Amino acid sequence: MRQSRINTALLGLACLLAGVAGVMGAGCSTAQREELSGTPVIVLEDSNVKATLASRSGFLREGPNEFMVEFRTAQGTPVDVGAITLYFDMPAMGSMPYMKNDAQLTTTTTPGLYRGTVTLEMKGTWQAKLDYAGQAGTGSITGTINAR
């Protein structure tokens, strides 16, 4: 009976340490991998990575937006790109000033997959600008989206 309690306590400690280390131990609960969901809004590519931004509607709109961004290597395997910044900007036109809206990105349980939010100030053509720096290298990718 005492040995069983010790084994249970040791297994619990091993699971706790495995969770802290970011690895899964035998007999420990496992985190589910997430997948890119939604319809692609824009695909941004350079020689290192392909970033797909997808939303449920397949577009971004004026106001608050939720989306996902997935990074893959040129060979198509998911890749954690490290530090990321993403913003959407629109040049000044006539009496309208320059606008810049920063996206907020958070990691998921899947390497290379991020959840994002951004609030776009108005409908129209925006430049998406994404910078990354990490194991996939360093890059800056831009593309155009039309907010509805």
Image (cartoon, grey):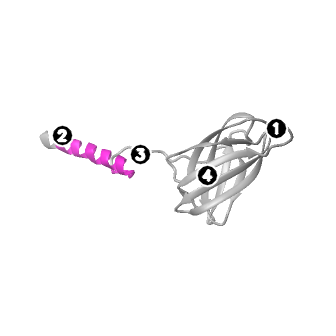
| Marks 3 and 1, how far apart at CA | 51 Å
Q: In the rendered image, which residue does mark 1 sit on?
A: 96
Q: Considering the numbered disc 3 on the image, is that residue within a helix, a strand or a loop? A: loop
SS label for mark 1: loop
Q: Earlier along the polypeptide chain: callout 2 or callout 4?
A: 2
What residue sits right under mark 2 in the picture?
5
Q: Which mark is residue 113?
A: none
Q: Quadrant of residue 95?
A: top right
In the displayed structure image, the side of residue 14 where residue 130 appears, left or right:
right
Residue 30: numbered disc: 3
Of the residues shown, which amino acid type is indicated by label 4?
Glu
Can you give x and y, in whole percent of width and height, for residue 147 in the image? 77, 40
Looking at the image, can residue 112 be seen?
no
Q: Tell us which disc is closer to us: 1 or 2.
A: 1
Q: CA distance from mark 1 to mark 2?
A: 69 Å
Q: Earlier along the polypeptide chain: callout 3 or callout 2?
A: 2
Q: Residue furthest left?
A: 2
Of the two numbered discs 4 and 1 in the rendering, the one whose residue sits closer to the viewer: 1
Which label sits on residue 70? Answer: 4
What range of the chain is rendered magenta? 6-26
Pinpoint residue 137: horizontal percent, then vertical percent: 56, 64
* Residue contact between numbered discs 3 and 1, judged by CB atoms under 8 Å: no
Q: Is residue 47 visible?
A: yes
- Amino acid under disc 1: Met
